[in-house]
Image: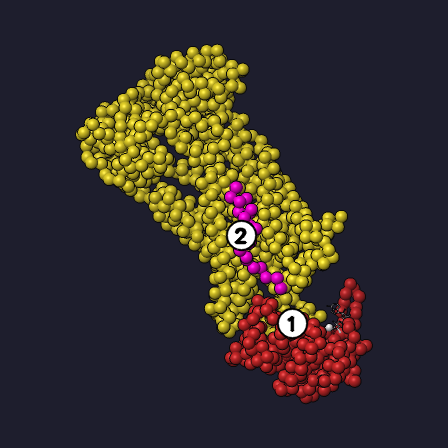
Chain colours: A red, B yellow
Amino acid sequence: MILEVDKVVKGYTQASKKLDVLDGLDLQIERPKSIAILGKSGSGKSTFLSLLGGLDRPDEGKIVVNGQNITAMKESELAKYRAENIGIVFQQFHLMKTFTALENVMLPLEILKKENPREKAMKALEQVGLADRANHFPHQLSGGECQRVAVARAIAPEPKIILADEPSGNLDTETGESVMNMIFELCQRRESVLILVTHDTDLARSCDQIYELSSKKLKAI
Amino acid sequence: MTVLKIAFRDLVNSRGFTALFLFNLFLGICGFVTLHSFRDNVNSLLDQRSKQLLSADVAVSGRRTLTKEETQGINDYLKDKAVEVMDSIEVYSMSKSKDKRSRLVQIKAVEKSFPFYGEVKLEKDTSDMEGLQKKSHIWVEPQLMAQMKLELGDPLSLGDKTFKVMGVIENDTSTSLRGIGLAPKVYVGLSNLKETNLISFGSVSTNVKLVKLLPEWEKKAEQVKLELGKILKDPGLRIRLPKDASEQVGRILNYLSDYLGLVGLVALFLSGIGSGYLFQNFLFEKLEDIGILKSLGMSLGQISMIYFLQLGVLSLASVLGANVFVWSILPLIGDALSTWTGMSGELKLGWETVYLSYLVAFGASLFICAPILLKMVGRKIQNLFQGGQFFRWEFEKRDLLLYAPLALFMWGLAVAQAHSFKIGTFFTLVLFIVVIIVSLGFPVLFSFMDKRWLTKKNLTRPLSLSWGLAARYFSRDRLSSTLTICALAIGVMLLSLIGQLETSLREELEQDVGRKPDLFLFDIQEYQKDGLVALAQEEGFSLRSPSPMVRSRILKINGEKFKRSEKEDEAFSTREEETSRRFRNRGINLSFADGPNESETIIEGRPFSGRYEDESKPAELSIERRYARRLGLEIGDTVTFEILGIEVQGVVVNLRRVRWTSFLPNFFIVFQPGAIDDAPKTYLAAVDSLTEEQRYAVQDKIVDKYSNVSIVSVTEIVSKIMNIFKAMAQALTIMAGLCLSIGFFTLYAITQNQLKKKRFEAAIQKVFGFSPGQLLKTLLAEYFILATLACVIGLGFSVVLGQVVSIIFFDGVGRPDWMFMLKIGVGVYAVTFLIAIASGRSFYSLKIKSLLS
Ligand SMILES: Nc1ncnc2c1ncn2[C@@H]1O[C@H](COP(=O)(O)OP(=O)(O)O)[C@@H](O)[C@H]1O
Ligand SMILES: [Mg+2]
């Protein structure tokens, strides 16, 4: 079992009003594959991803990744878990502006103290086809190129799980498609789990399995 | 009107920017307003007191007795203009108590109607001017009572006569700067001075005629001065009006406030940098708005109007604040002024200061921010919509033109603040050179370092991941890094420089303490010289060879007549003009010697050829180099002197450098031996190496035998100079401290501005596994680099400048004060880290989830 989500509850309190976003959500993934999560805006997709990524904690229930219960982890363990197991691709790329493309990809490798971070980062950049732009800064790259750098950054440490939150949302259709194809291909080659959040049903169909988040739960379609 | 509405809504919505900008400009203007107001008040207090300082409407003074014709001329001229004319004489002399203690005093012999204005108030009103005229009465200043352990009624000898102390002076309106004079004052009745036999040839006495004009002539004092000047042709005689008297006193304080003014200008400049940065960031966030307004058809002028309006409101608010603040601390300044100078009076915030502060505030913010605004507003709509994210601050050649008005503005302010074209221009040039080096040099340096050490390396280089990241942040965010370094480095430099100068001066004064004389003797009469040498041998103290002093005045230079300056009444004169004018109108003391003494070196020309023999040729002269520059003298020039009515010609053969702090007898002009040896003269001499007890014992012995010889304690003078300088250094340090605070405030403002960006990047790092500890380490590493660079640059410059100044002014190389620099360094690191930690605190509680939206 790679991933096991068990009766997770998550809500937000705002202005003394409690808003339940996820309630009793379950999910099991046994072997590497790609899954898509569809859902209306505001249905809690990003919230769910943030729980998987260890960016936030559930109110109830537990999440077990590779036998580790991440809901019981301390903040410092969580940081280590994130670095080793999870790669995240954001809708807004979130690259460090003062760092070159290569340095952005190197960052997680260096934090993990991996051997030969340079070479590994270069290879990841090659895989997204940006080897020749390695020393460019984000402001010198187009939106699609920035997202490809972000993808390279997410896959470079070879994580077991890649979380992608509407990665093509900020790109035009064509660029978005090519970035998506790249993500699919890389995940397949590296045998990692891809959890893709999208509201594009066509895109979702390219995944091994499709879920929909509605009424605070995941339903397989 | 939409423009107004948008302008105010923006300001209210960007409260952070508004507050930072206001406070920053406020700090800068505060320094300026405080100084201007200080100067203004000093001058107006002096103005009010000027008649009391002079104690008359007009005073004619000279270092000789007036001739019969001169006196006659004055009396004839003043017959129908003056209420009364009285004489007074000032002379330095030793006083002796009954237990043979001796001290140098400044005797002021006055008539019973003294002073025409003001008062000499005694403790417990033990006497009055009428009483002072009695045979043996004197009044003394309290410090002399303490020094000589005197009681009221005790005897005190001056010259050949013994007096009785009948009054202790509590307040004397004719004393300008309390405690700064060479010696304490003693009042004597004018008719009693003669019996002291102190007024012999060569004694340093000043004869003063004090005039009280009729009311209708009081207003025409300027005319009286001019006409008296025509009657008294000798430029060695000074004719002074109340305002001249106060100018003399004001000069010292104005010197101080001039330099304070320049430091204040640096503060203003720094706060300008900070404000400019803030404004630019503010505009960055408004780029999209500007784009929208433009696309909706608003004209460039209207859009600019929005931001100029905001600038205007902000400047107005900060200058109002600064005025109110300074107004509220005026009593404090007044206290400082009165303890320091004895001048008291209510300080006011003058209109001129207020006007000027508005000019400065609006000028500074307009000239700094307008170029930024013009550059941004002028962009294409397309670029504007890309927002601040894609806007790169690039320096183009035409920016120089945009900033030219700022440069001119600064230059004008500097000249006005320093009251000197030369100093103001020099200051501006230095500032510009620094700015150009920094604004062009740092970016180049950073990108070089980046290419050389960072880009092609792992992120763990140099040192560790935290350092690697910090180094990259620092070298790549060039604008912020450059500005923060600048702001801090300039503050550090000023603070350290002032410390360096104080140390240099102290060391210079304390240097070779063993070799410095302890006592300095003057007014030694020619016939007393040999006796004094014998006394020294007898008593076993070492007397350095006495130097002759001949009084004269300069008649011609290269055959051209030296005249009383006509320009004296010009309203605005720069410091240089004033100084050279003062120099010219005075008599000059000459000496003669075989060559330079141990504190002198010839720096240009040749030594004397020996004794003066050939009377057909002018005698050879050696001139002190600064004095030569003042008079415009060069080697080969001829100077004609008048010594007691006889003309003597000399030709300059060399220029000398003099270490004045050696306190040996030194002269501006020295003749070769043989030329003026026969002229009437007195001698100066120095006595060496004594313990404190010996010092007074030797002094008492000399005075016992030669009552007319005046003796000053070099040690006392050195400590007096040090005290004055310390007070000045304190004032300067406060201003430099203000600069450094503004530097830190700029750092804080820039940090606040970057916080959003920094938090965002910290969140990304956290996603990839960075722990809060590592984040903090990275942040501290970045500020460590900043503090280190600021210290290295600031302290480095201060050492270099300190050396330059000490070479120019003290003819020596001072030793940098490492301890003081260390203290500054520690302080800078501490405050920088504090700011870093304060702004980094929010990183801990950071919700990285906010990255997903
Ligand atoms: N930090 C937060 N505080 C309060 N409410 C939040 C917060 N984050 C998200 N929400 C709310 O939770 C719900 C789910 O949000 P999200 O997970 O971002 O949805 P999605 O990604 O599916 O559009 C929304 O109604 C949103 O308003
Ligand atoms: Mg979302």
Query: Which residue is at a point 54% across and 39% down the rendered structure image?
Result: B35
Circle count: 2
The answer to whether the beta carbon of the residue marked 2 is less than 8 Å from any atom of ligand 2 is no
Q: Is residue B679 above or below residue A108?
A: above
Please provide percent x and percent y for residue B836. 57, 60
Please provide percent x and percent y for residue A99. 56, 69
Q: Which residue is mark 1?
A: A143
At label 1, the amino acid type is Gly
Name the secondary structure under disc 1: helix
> Which chain does the residue under circle 1 lie in?
A
Whether B398 is among the magenta residues is yes
Name the secondary structure under disc 2: helix
Query: Which residue is at a point 48% across and 62% down the rendered structure image?
Result: B445
The stretch of residues the image draws in magenta is: B390-412
Q: Which residue is mark 2?
A: B400
Whether B560 is among the magenta residues is no
Residue reaching furthest to the left: B613
Please provide percent x and percent y for residue B136. 38, 16
> Which chain does the residue under circle 2 lie in?
B
At label 2, the amino acid type is Leu
Please provide percent x and percent y for residue B604. 28, 41
- What is the number of the mark on residue B828? none
